[in-house]
Amino acid sequence: MDRRDLVRSLRLVGSRNGWPAVRAAWRRRRIDARDLPARGAERARVPGAAYSAEPLPGGGVVRFAQSSLRVRVAVGGAVFCGWDGAAPEPSYALAGECPEADTRAVLEPDKDGWRVVSERITVVVFRHGAVEFRTPGGVPLRRELPPRWWDGSGRMSRWVQRARTPADAVVFGLGGRASGPRLATGAYRLWNTDPCAPFGPGDDPLYITMPVQFVVADGGCHLVFHDNTWDGWVCLRDGEEGAGSGHDQPGGCEVRFEGGPLRYWVMAGSPGRVLGTWTALTGRPALPPRWALGYQHARWGFGSAQEVRRVAAGYRERGMPVSALHLDIDHFDGHRVFTVDREAFPELPSLVEELREDGIQLVSIVDPAVKAEPGSAVYDSGTAADAFVRDARGQVVRGLVWPGETVFPDFTEPRVRRWWGGLYAERLEQGFAGFWHDMNEPTSFTVFARYGESTLPDSARHGMEGRGGDHREAHNVYGLAMARAGYEALRELRPDRRPFLFSRSGWAGMQRYGGTWSGDVATGWPGLRASLALVLGLGLCGVPYSGPDVGGFHAMPSPELYVRWWQLSAYLPFFRTHSAIEAGRREPWEFGPQAEECVRVALAERVRLLPYLYTLAHLAQRTGAPYVRPLWWHDPEDRRLRACGDAFLLGDALLVAPVVEQGATTRTVRLPPGRWYDAATGAVHRGPGQVLLAAPLDRTPVLVRAGAVLPVAVEDGIGLEVWAPAAGQSGEGVLISDEGDGWDQPRVERFASRWRDGAVVVEREGADEVGHPVSVRGLAHNPS
């Protein structure tokens, strides 16, 4: 037990729920000791030598002495590999049915064994089970070594697969990792976990883990996804180049799972193409309503409608627009989900109407745990629907969460998702416009490491879409299935509006239901840096809508830290302040006049950029490209850009360099190729290269790509801010707009900027007139 676990455990024991947590942890341990199958003797095996191959549409099957491998290239370019008869379905990751096979790809003999050649990738299967993926030009991207299984009687095989990557390769992804965005040599667990304490860069795993690796090397980019929901580990090892000697040490990856199928997908190409292929396979990101891109304010501890009104009035009186307020568990009646504390919030629908008059939406937290209390509506209806997770002997599993002793819906069962989805009608009747899923790893409080994980028993039974299984398989997709239940219900209950839903936990494919946030990030400069790492890493896993709790969750930030966190978050997709009940208020005016003015400037810039951000949201929904992109997005072969984790591209036009060091008033920025303007001064910088930018407390360094046509908010609607292209060159931009929260076809306008007769002009594709007011910037530094 480490020190943090001990402190947390002692705090729990001394708290109101301390001894119930001890009992719940003991009960969990007892159930697993009774119901989990004993491991017993195991037999190791490897594929052995290949003895035959059978061509099939899109690839074929290679049979080995002790296993078989199915290779299948799908339409769109993704390659599926399944050992031991594993098929692409059933899968929680895939959106709908598995894509059809690309019949142009054929399994054919090769000097090393067999190969499958496709438009984007070549797969070579060696005679003893190694599999190599190459670019169309023959450059190796990844070599999977023969896997190894440990077969035990009466249980699924656990397995390990090792891989080699180029010596210069770097890895991103694996879900939300605070130590990123680049993942260094080390072991990363694949088990969604509530750390039960504020976390920073050294803490792992966290709430969202995904077996998704985004690998970048000089030879090209690829993404590999192991479609397995069991507990596992990914161990990474950096490669070493031989400094011209030719003796390179390749990078290494070892993937281990405690059960489940050995199957994986590989896709290659440019970063944009890889994310496009990945989200075509697992689902395009849900498009949030336009208001969800505005600033949102939350606090655990609003406590009453009067306090909500006070906070809303504070923003209104100061002319600081807020798009949503979030109610945490303290608005529930005794922390019971789908209830309202009528003493603290006597007329909640009336409060909702008051807020909407000021343009403010109300968002409700939703926890999965249901208080085990006969006579309460949710518990009784769930009991009647047989909705709650049971153990191997048929008894309902009980845990401990905020309302006390609780039971947990089995979201892996379709009929339970339908039952749970019907409960959102109560939230809509109260007037809530959005939903915040929390505690859905799922978390059940425990104490002391020897009592196990803070979740359900491993042996707890789940429906798994009718196949049956236990919590070892269901745990990582619990939050994903809960998000599906909520999203599908909102589509049915309120069909004219796009759902707004974000979830603390999830898995591959969660983007099709909504977004996420950081969870309980530690208040401090390391927590600020971890916040950006999480957003960048999740974006490369296909989840573009995310952001941190501004200021950190558990403690009161200094005014400087609060301002810098605000400035970073003003350029991230999900923009929300939030804090724990004991951590103090997060309203800007609580941090002094100077901090309030700095926040006002950052908020004004957020509002000005909303048309651009909403365009990026539409582009993410269409292509899978994240709003927030690493600096190497267009230049993955530039190793210096691959090493930059403290700056990012917002779309193609903006480069944001937030201040993440205490006391800093300047910062160094690595530039991608091209001409860049300082948004504050108009100064010109040319990349690739490194520049030093001023970063006073009231400003975040932001650079704009030359030629960019930015849609921005102006007094009468939407205008175009054009940054002069370099002499003899042109630029472009796009504006995508709609009604803001419905399903109507959006309007797409494309623009080009160029020099003509000594002036910068803007043209709209397919139209004689631009249709928007235009302002041109950068001319003072571009006299041509």
Image (cartoon, rainbow, N blue to C red):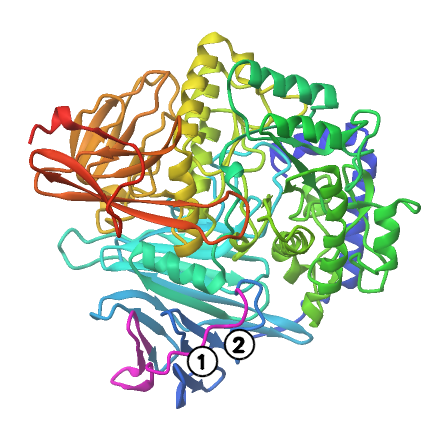
Q: Tell me where the magenta segment starts and ends, as one range.
A: 95-124
From where the camera sits, is residue 541 visible?
A: no
Relative to 331, residue 278 above or below = below
Q: Residue at x 78, y 34 (%)?
A: 332
Magenta highlight on residue 120: yes
Residue located beneath label 2 in the image: 86
Q: Is residue 742 above or below residue 302?
A: below
Dominant SS of magenta comes to: loop
Residue 333, quarter of the rendered image: top right
Q: Position of residue 708 (x, y in %)?
A: 24, 39
Q: Looking at the figure, which quarter contains the N terminus?
A: top right
Quadrant location, the C terminus = top left
Residue 226 location, x and y as percent?
Answer: 48, 64
Q: Is residue 59 left or right of residue 751?
A: right
Residue at 47% across / 39% down in the picture?
A: 178
| Circle 2 SS class | loop
Is 45 on the left or on the right of 480, as rendered? left
